[in-house]
Image: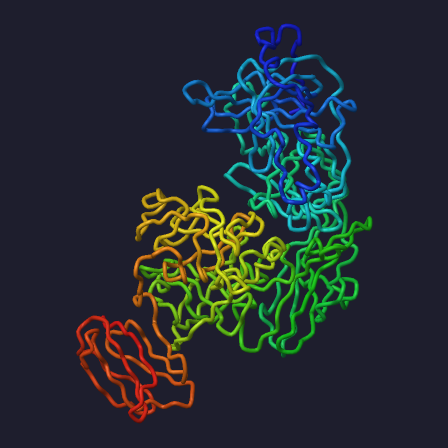
Amino acid sequence: MKTRLTLLLIGLFGLMSTSASGQYPKISIKQLQEVSQSKLAACNDSSAYFGDTVTVVGVVVQDANLIDVPSSSVQGGFRPFVHVIDTADNGKSGDFKGLQVMGVYSDAGGNSLPVSDVYNLYAGMVVEFTGVVGRYQGETQLNILNNSSINVLGNQTAPKPLVISLGLLNDNTRTNKLETGEEYEDSYVEIQDVTVSAVYNFSGNRVSFDITDKDGNVMNVSDRFFAQKTSSYTTTRSSAPVKQGSFDPPVVGTKFDYIRGIIMHSENGCTGSSGRGYEINPTRDSDYKIGKTPPNISGVTRMPVVPSDADKATISAKIIDFDGTIASTKLFYSTNLTDAYDAFTEVAMTLKMGTTDTYEAEIPAQTEGSIVRYYIYATDDIAQESYMPFSANASNNPNFMFYTVRNGGLSISDIQRVLNVANDASPFEGQEVTVTGVVTASAKAYDLEQIYIQDPTADKWAGIKCQGNSDLIQLFRGQEVTVTGTVAENFGYTVLNVTDVKKTGEVKTVDVVTLDPSDSAFYFSKEAEAYEGMLVGMTNPAGGKIYISNGRLNGFGEYMISTDEDASYGKSRRVQAGIQNNNNASSLWVSIVSDTTLKDVDGTMNVAPIKAEKGMSFDTIVGIMFYGFGNYNLIPRNDDDFIGSSVNLPDTDYPEIVSVRNVVKQNGITLYPNPAQNEINFKVDGSIRPDAIQIMDLNGKVVMSSTLNLMGSVDISTLTDGMYIVNCFEKGASVASFRVIKH
């Protein structure tokens, strides 16, 4: 992968004309890339030359033939790229002087063709390019105009890496810092003293990994170059210097003295996109320097998983040192949520009997409801330190493992709650748990066709998606159920893979928690994580309407709402509807969609589509809070979730999806199940005691009357299938009225 291309400059591009450059303005790379601080502060990092055709000159950072980007849309199957630095200051990086050049253009027939000569550019070449200024996921690109738009001017020393801090680029949630990071886009940099905090295997043959600095800031190390292609990766590009990768992925906990590479932008955060922030792409083998390996801590377990107030918690972990020996292992814990990491109580970890690398320690029994935070610390024979979690000692945003002491078993909130939204994985990931909740979305027709349950006694961390068990499809909204399953994370979204479902026989209501769709800080700070999987309503806190502010955000069925129809992206929230595929699971029973062509695309809609238009207004839009691809989306279940709509929606009355359609507004009377087959049941939580009921058909004809003894069951098996009105009386006075389906 270090092969130097043996090329002769003389005559290499002899067939290329320089005439193209004379037709368009010639600007510096810095002019093209520089964005004012005021624009960056407003979450706008777009080039002032976006859409223009320009000519620039730059020095090539690395051999372009070392880039391997497959693309099915480009003839030949690959998309050529090269990265260049402004020739000012002898090719010094930073200060908006880096640029990505893409060698693809369209012919008269609209076909995407590669500028294959891009692959002949190598580090140190000074090259003039003419192309159109474009943009992809936050990355400014120069798209070469045609196959005659490259002119090699000479050669100089290849650019050296610029040493910068990771914290200039991303924060501890891997969110891009535009105001300090944008100037390094497409520059060649060096980031020092980092630890591998996560490894991602994807597409079957590729790998990337996250690195974390001492302050907890996070960046992804990506694989645009052959330097990070694994042995399972094979290229079919005929001009590639190698055909198969050879990169050996690091393990979590690996220390790097430095990583060098090209900074690329995959925008997220306030820009509204769902990428991975600024990423670094090593260009060659020498761009990685592994440091002394500290102890590796893995396989952390806790027994019991849910301690009661009578239980000690035994914490175990596998701790090894790949290039030395373990000198010390310790467990630290605290029940005070304000304690800094160095104020935790210390407990020595000892080698577990019969093992050579498993250490354990005990946390004493704590009182019911206590939240116990803990972390593990280890050192080796050369005083290299490790923490688990890795950022336990981070100065700006430490992270810890934790559990809640429960005598009566877990709640949904215990599964969903995190103490640091920078790491939003459930503390029970991979564990089998049992929880009780009320169904807020069902698999029934007219509904979301996915199952969510929620704890009606909690207003945060209270909802979760349930999947994987056929008994779930029998549930109706409002039913209380106890489910057992394994907690899993699906790209940051917590789900429960259910193995057992038990109905408690109770029917309960879940209050909708209202949120402000224009509160940008709430979403960008990830406070919204507390509402993941919950039934929420987007409302105007001032009492006015909410509006559609962008009728079509993208091609994924998303549009935007806010308290102001002219609200910016940052002050609007996403709504998704009308699309179901491998990556999206919104409702097909919602009329208002971003594009009416969704009627028969990615799932067939069950209602007539209505194009979402800017300015449409509503009192409230209700739905499930979903998290995916770095964004929080509201997913309405059907048209009933659009309350006070300025658009005429189809008449809706979907009693088939709920176990109890109406609960009396006073007196606390509940009827269930609904729909009902043979009997209806009554429950009273208040002081009223109905003594009789009267059942009418929809024409007002009384079809059944019955007395009630302290509220109980009424046999309706003799009624024909259909809808009925059930009126409840106490001493002749009407106290409740229900609409019931008999089937």
Between 223 and 706, the residue placed more toward the observer is 706
Q: Quadrant of the N terminus?
A: top right
Between 107 and 288, the residue placed more toward the observer is 107
* Residue 611 % position (x, y): 38, 47
Residue 730 shows in this picture: yes
Between 666 and 90, the residue placed more toward the observer is 666
Looking at the image, the residue that sits furthest to the right is 382
Q: Quadrant of the C terminus?
A: bottom left
Where residue 379 sits, quadrant-wise, is bottom right
* Residue 451 % position (x, y): 41, 61
For the point 76% across and 63% down, the residue is 340
* Residue 185 % position (x, y): 67, 34
- Seen in the picture, residue 344 relative to 283 is either above or below; the reply is below
For the point 65% across and 41% down, the residue is 250
* Residue 5 % position (x, y): 65, 16
Where residue 261 sits, quadrant-wise, is top right
